Amino acid sequence: MEIKTSVLVVDDNQDLAENIAEILDLRGFVTMIATSGEEALPRALRDSASMLVTDFRLPGMSGAELVRQVRERRRDLRAVVMSAYTDDDTVAAALDAGADFLPKPVDFSALSRFLTAP
């Protein structure tokens, strides 16, 4: 039996988070949803998610800060930060936190490659 990769999707836009999760589900991932960094942080630390896909701009804690805090305790968790803002500062913040960066609108083929890369 194949073990499916679990992904925690974080976006303050509930509909977008659900759409991303649904598409990832169809591609064979198991997904969970959170709508803020504060909601996602304890889940990322205790749940079985092996991947984190988060929006950069969240109310309160940014996606980059979420990744930074999670990766302090879970070095094994892979992360992708998404944003419609692709300025150098946004991309650098995501990369410095230890995440890959993916521009919005989401290219699901690229996201799947990030999530399945070794």
Image (cartoon, rainbow, N blue to C red):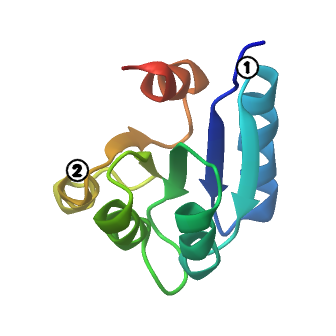
- Residue 58 lies left or right of residue 114; in this view the side is right
Q: Tell me, for residue 27, which label it has, or none.
A: 1
Q: Amino acid at mark 1?
A: Arg
**Label 2 Cα neighbours within 10 Å, binned few <14 / some 14-19 / many ≥20:** some
Q: What is the quadrant of residue 30 in the picture? A: top right
Q: Residue furthest front?
A: 1
- Helix, strand or loop at label 1? It is loop
Is residue 33 depicted above or below 63 in this figure? Answer: above
Q: Residue furthest top?
A: 1
- Residue 86 lies left or right of residue 31; in this view the side is left
- Residue 105 lies left or right of residue 32; in this view the side is left
Q: Which residue is mark 2?
A: 95
Q: What is the quadrant of residue 118 in the picture? A: top left
Residue in the picture at 78% in, 63% down: 14
**Label 1 Cα neighbours within 10 Å, binned few <14 / some 14-19 / many ≥20:** few
Of 46 and 70, nearer the camera is 46
Where in the figure is residue 8, as x and y percent of width and height? 63, 52
Where in the figure is residue 52, as x and y percent of width and height? 52, 50
Q: Amino acid at mark 2?
A: Leu
Q: What is the quadrant of residue 33 in the picture? A: bottom right
Q: Tell me, for residue 36, which label it has, or none.
A: none
* For marks 1 and 2 on the same chain, the one whose residue lies earlier in the sequence: 1
Residue in the picture at 47% in, 69% down: 57
